[in-house]
Amino acid sequence: MELDERQYRNALGRFTTGICVVSAVSEANAPIAMTINSFSSLSLSPSLVQWSIKKKSMCYPLFSRLGRYTISVLSDKQAHISQRYAKPGEHAMHPDDYSSTESGVPYIRGSLAHFVCKSWGQMEAGDHDILIAAVEGFSTDAEGKPLVFFGGGYRPLLI
């Protein structure tokens, strides 16, 4: 049985996700970023997280080979940042959006949390690759509500 791809995608959109930004320093030594909603914890010991990237994505060559990067959990006040780094081909980081870790890896300023990651493994999964990272450090610098996505758009979280 073959599923209708549009209907399947719409059904998946009924699952609420958080929004994150993966950021790193490119091979050309420039800060780059990409919006994701596929982030999740994987293991507490060792400390592992995972996210996925579409193989046909224009940014696949940049982001699938990262050795070190951060994953920043966006707040509900950062939808503009999510939109900025979700655009195809526009992954250079805006200077006002980020700070850098002690090791020089950029993260989104004002995010609810950020995780400093080192590539740990990668696995093919259909039209995506699942990227697994060891968490080397983290910070929960900001208070606030998360930016959430449901049914094709950003939604408020009432807490």
Image (spheres, rainbow, N blue to C red):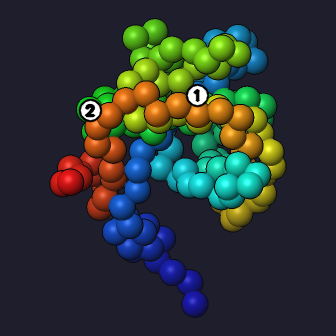
Residue in the picture at 27% in, 48% down: 154
Residue bearing mark 1: 23
Q: Amino acid at mark 1?
A: Ser
- Residue 141's x, y, as percent? 43, 27
Give the mark, 2 or 1, whose residue is nearer the N terminus: 1
Up-down relation of residue 28 to residue 3 (above or below): above
Q: CA distance from mark 2 to mark 1?
A: 19 Å
Per the image, label 1 sits on a secondary structure element best described as strand
Q: Please tell me which residue lies in front, 122 or 48.
A: 48
Out of 128 and 146, give the one closest to the viewer: 146
Q: Quadrant of residue 104?
A: top right
Q: Residue at horizontal 57%, vertical 15%?
A: 100
Residue 139 in the image: state x and y as whole percent. 53, 31
Query: Mark 2 is on which residue type?
Result: Lys
Judge whether residue 60 can be spotted in this image: yes
Quadrant location of the C terminus in the rendered image: bottom left
Q: Secondary structure at mark 2?
A: loop
- Quadrant of the drawing holding the N terminus: bottom right
Q: Is residue 93 above or below residue 42?
A: above
The residue at which mark 2 appears reads as: 77
- Whether residue 146 sits left or right of residue 67 in the image: it is left
Residue at 47% x, 17% y: name it: 98
Circle 1 crowding by C-alpha within 10 Å: few under 14, some 14–19, many from 20: many
Within 10 Å of disc 2 (Cα), the crowding (few <14, some 14-19, many 20+) is: few
**Quadrant assignment, res 24:** top right
> Where is residue 38 drawn, in percent x and y?
53, 53
Q: Is residue 54 visible?
A: no
